[in-house]
Amino acid sequence: MEAQSLPHWDVSGLFPSPRSPDFEAAVQCFFTALDEATSRFDSLGVMARVEPLPVTEETIRTAEESLARLNDLQAEHHRLQAYLRAFTSTNSHDEIAQAQTSRLEAKSVALYQLETRFTAWLGAVDIEALIRRSSFCAEHAFSLRKRAIAARHLMSPEEEALAAQLHTTGKGAWRKLYNTYSSQITAEVALPEGKRLLPMTAVRNLAHHPDREVRRLAYEAELAAWEANAVPIAAALNSIKGEQALLARKRGWASPLDLALFNNNIDRETLDAMMGAARESFPHFRRYLHIKARLLGLERLAWYDLFAPVGREGKPLSFEEARDFILKQFAAFSPRMAEMGRRAFAEHWIDAEPREGKRGGAFCMWLHDEESRILANYQPSCRGMGTLAHELGHAYHNYVRAGLTYHQRLTPMTLAETASIFSETLVRRAALKQATPEEQKAILDASLQGATQVIVDITSRFLFEQRLFEAREARELTLAELKALMVEAQRETYGDGLDGEHLHPWMWAAKVHYYGSIFYNFPYMFGILFARGLYARYEAEGEAFLAAYDDLLASTGRYGAAELAARFGIDLHSADFWHSALASIIDEINQFAALAEG
């Protein structure tokens, strides 16, 4: 497939360009609304209070007005930010979009301060009484209850204001440096046909190449490129994790992990049950890796063999073929999902071409109303189709939340992966049914590659981040120490499934998530297992499942994970649920093993 044939997304429906008068007018309107809200908060006395505030009619009006203003401001801020991200994520050289992003971020400190002031003000209010007496507050009950807890973890107003101001020159600046700098890294790969200078996204895509020598050369070039660019990346990681740990401690959290659990709407008991079940499943994943090594004629897989193809997919799967297959499966599942999918392709929601300056990997971002935009670096294969289906699942999640307020839409990462994994599973199961044994082998391998990443590799990344935070309390870590921590975690999780001398010591540099979130990793594991558990319910219930599923997706910002799971009779504290969800992956390993023997 010619790279030029792959689509780019279109956001011109919002504004002609980041330098257009229309965009400038929208930015100025947002800035004016932000200034007006700040003045209004001042006049209403929305700020931290020492004495409890009785729930009077005036208190109710203040709560409702403040929440409504924040909903509107944050929705517009998100729209402007997402619009600019559509340019910076696909072309990090776009200086206009970068400058506009910086300008928006600088002014948005005031929005963060309003958020903090409202949270602090709620700390003096009887939240349950407020919810009983205001229907608008009742519609935002979950958000308000979370804020009441968060209020107990705020620093002084002066410290919170200073932290907000320093964000753009601290963690925010380091994250921006990482995103821009890493997207521009290139590596010279000594391919059999000659040396080629490739963007990092293209180098990493060579991990899927059928020729082991090509994979090895790409792996070596990748490691060399990370090493050559490691100093600023390590500085970014040390600075970001140092700031995250400091602020968590100053806000009274026992650890950054406790803050991450709160942000993800789960508790430690749920995390322990899930992670414990995952660890008990590692022998099954190692068995899969051993089978794959045998199919490739190897004694043991090296890191660069993890994504090596096995089986035969047949001819490469064009973007158009992937589109048609996905839409067919969406239509078989739900008319509503099919309509969203048709719009995504027809209205240019997807940017699929790998190119220099474009961010690697894939993501889906909510743009506005029911619309999303999907970034992919499409490869003509079942894996590439699976990635598209995954991101379209995120888009469907955004689609069913249309009409909700900003705070009602807010979804933690744990639940944000539900629709994406479900959608990916839907497409993969359909592909398996019509495949030949060799094609089934390839499809199952692609699925198990992903599951291995989310169960085994995610555990290694979790362990790395946990140990990094512990060590960072004392001082910055050297390059050698960061690499050692990463390799230690990989050996602990992959065990004898991989050649311990050929791991990936620079994974901390390659994973963008370390530079934004705190413990971004475990929510992905939660997502795949929770979604697989739901998919089993769909197989049992059929069409009757659809309404409950859509309602769950529309409710992910309005209820905790445990309450949503309970709607389907799921106890997240029970290791039995996590083992049952893992059982569907183990079944795939058994199918893969049977095909390998055949």
Image: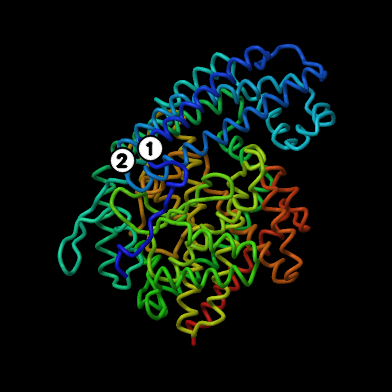
Q: Amino acid at mark 2?
A: Asp
Q: Is residue 84 left or right of residue 231?
A: right
Callouts 1 and 2 close, C-beta under 8 Å:
yes
Q: CA distance from mark 1 to mark 2?
A: 10 Å
Q: Residue furthest left?
A: 194
Residue at the spot of label 1? 18
Eye-nearest disc, 1 or 2: 1
Classify 10 Å Cα crowding around label 2: few (below 14), some (14-19), many (20 and above). Answer: few
- Closest to the observer: 221 or 443? 443
The residue shown at (52%, 79%) is 593
Where residue 426 appears, as percent x and y from the top left, is: 59, 68
- Closest to the observer: 51 or 332? 332
Residue at the spot of label 2? 94
Hey, which quadrant is residue 208 in on the image?
A: bottom left
Q: Is residue 546 left or right of residue 207?
A: right
- Looking at the rendered structure, the number of numbered marks drawn on it comes to 2
Hey, which quadrant is residue 85 in on the image?
A: top left
Where residue 185 appears, as percent x and y from the top left, is: 27, 47
**Above or below for 55 versus 100:** above
Where residue 367 appears, as percent x and y from the top left, is: 51, 45
**Above or below for 75 versus 589:** above
* Image colouring: rainbow
For the N terminus, the image quarter is bottom left
The residue shown at (55%, 62%) is 341
Where disc 2 sits, the SS reads loop
Q: Residue furthest front?
A: 21
Residue 536, which numbered label?
none
Where disc 1 sits, the SS reads loop
Where residue 475 appears, as percent x and y from the top left, is: 40, 29
Q: Earlier in the sequence, mark 1 or mark 2?
A: 1
